[in-house]
Image (cartoon, grey):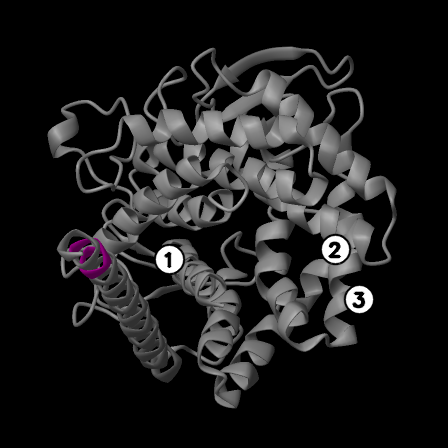
Amino acid sequence: MKYKFWIRAVAIGMIVTLAQCEKTASDDVKTSLTYCAEQASKTLVNIPHNGVMPRNIDSRETNWRYVPVEDWTSGFWPGILWYIYEATGDAKWKTEADKYTRMLTPLSQQPAHDHDLGFQIFSSFGNGYRLTHDSTYREVILRTADTLATLYNPKAGTILSWPGMVREKGWPHNTIIDNMINLELLFWASREGGNKALYDIAVHHAETTMKNHFRPDYTSYHVVLYDTLTGAKIKGITHQGLADESTWARGQAWAIYGFTMVYRETKDTRFLDFAQKVADVYLKDLPDDYIPYWDFHAVNIADAPRDASAAAITASALFELSGYVPADKGEYYRKMADGMLHTLSSDKYQSRQQNSSFLLHSTGHKPNGTEIDASIIYADYYYLEALLRKQKGQKRSDA
């Protein structure tokens, strides 16, 4: 009798402890979301009203560097505003998000400059349509998807990433791993009344990238060059990583995020299997605090800059990926994502009183000497997205 009572007491204790842990985690997310809203409020006070978007704050600076809407990062600020509206339900954020989103409309009315239309339009108009179902947003997204598709080379099977590099460096058809994220725009458009061929373009791009962009250990090249006429792979190189054969941290993060999304859109288990492989090789070499160095093969790595943006992108991806895999693997991915968010939400990585961004210590383009140990807008975007995904996951568990 005493034994049964003891077992029951232990079980009740475990349930209470688990509930307390879940409540603590939920409170932590709520605190971090409130922090993001407070920081974004500071930016709203100081942002110029001349059609520019915040991009980065260098480590020795306290104010945002602003860029025009043509910059590849322009969609992240309105995307952040939409996410804060989603988190708070406060209509003032919806008003601001709508204002900055509509500033990007001209991007949908001109020929494709490069592959970044997905980052620009889907982060802004895409989130806006998801939350409001405004038909004018839908029209912009559909029009932009058709524009992005004009960069597709059927011989190579991928979307041209940087037309400018064809002129500047003499590169032929080039595709960067970042381009995986832009496929979501095509999948969405094909499903929401756009050209059905957009789905096939997105799938072919993912298939070709899966075949040509990765080494035998599933680490990613940053750039792959293809023969423009025949579509044959020429070689894999880097542009923002340490070396052609090194593993650029944010590039691997884009791969994890991109192939997870492609599985969601296609339900093709090839992509789910691949998403796990590219995630697992990233996770096995992380430092103890879960934040990668800017390149996994960085020289004097203990003193190398970290990349909070890669951690934020990966955390967001892992929260989604965890829901598609068996329970034990899903628990592992959630644990790793939780570790990333815990570190990113610490006083070491949150900007707090240093500036009005959310995060410190991201690395944009180290070989070019730019945005090193900086606050960068896309780090903030994916950090906020990861917080929301964690929160939604908790709600599903509690239901």
Q: Mark number for residue 131? A: none
Q: Which mark sits nearer the N-terminus, 1 or 3? A: 3
Residue 6 shows up from this direction = yes
Asked if 220 appears above or below 255 in the picture, the reply is: above
Residue drawn at the location 57% of the way across and 35% of the way down: 259
The chief SS type of the magenta part is helix
Q: Quadrant of the N terminus?
A: bottom left
Q: Label 1, label 2: how many angstroms apart (C-alpha)? A: 26 Å
Q: Which mark sits nearer the N-terminus, 1 or 2? A: 2
Residue 111 shows up from this direction = no
Amino acid beneath label 3: Glu
Amino acid beneath label 2: Thr
Compare residues 170 and 111 and report the one nearer the observer: 111
x then y, percent, for residue 390: 41, 59
Compare residues 311 and 147 and report the one nearer the observer: 311
Q: Which residues are magenta?
A: 6-10
Residue placed under numbered mark 2 in the picture = 144
Question: Which element is circle 2 on?
Answer: helix
Camera-side mark, 1 or 2:
1
Question: Which element is circle 1 on?
Answer: helix
Residue placed under numbered mark 3 in the picture = 139
Asked whether, in this view, residue 101 is left or right of residue 390, the answer is right
Q: Label 1, label 3: how many angstroms apart (C-alpha)? A: 28 Å
Residue drawn at the location 44% of the way across and 81% of the way down: 88
Residue placed under numbered mark 1 in the picture = 383
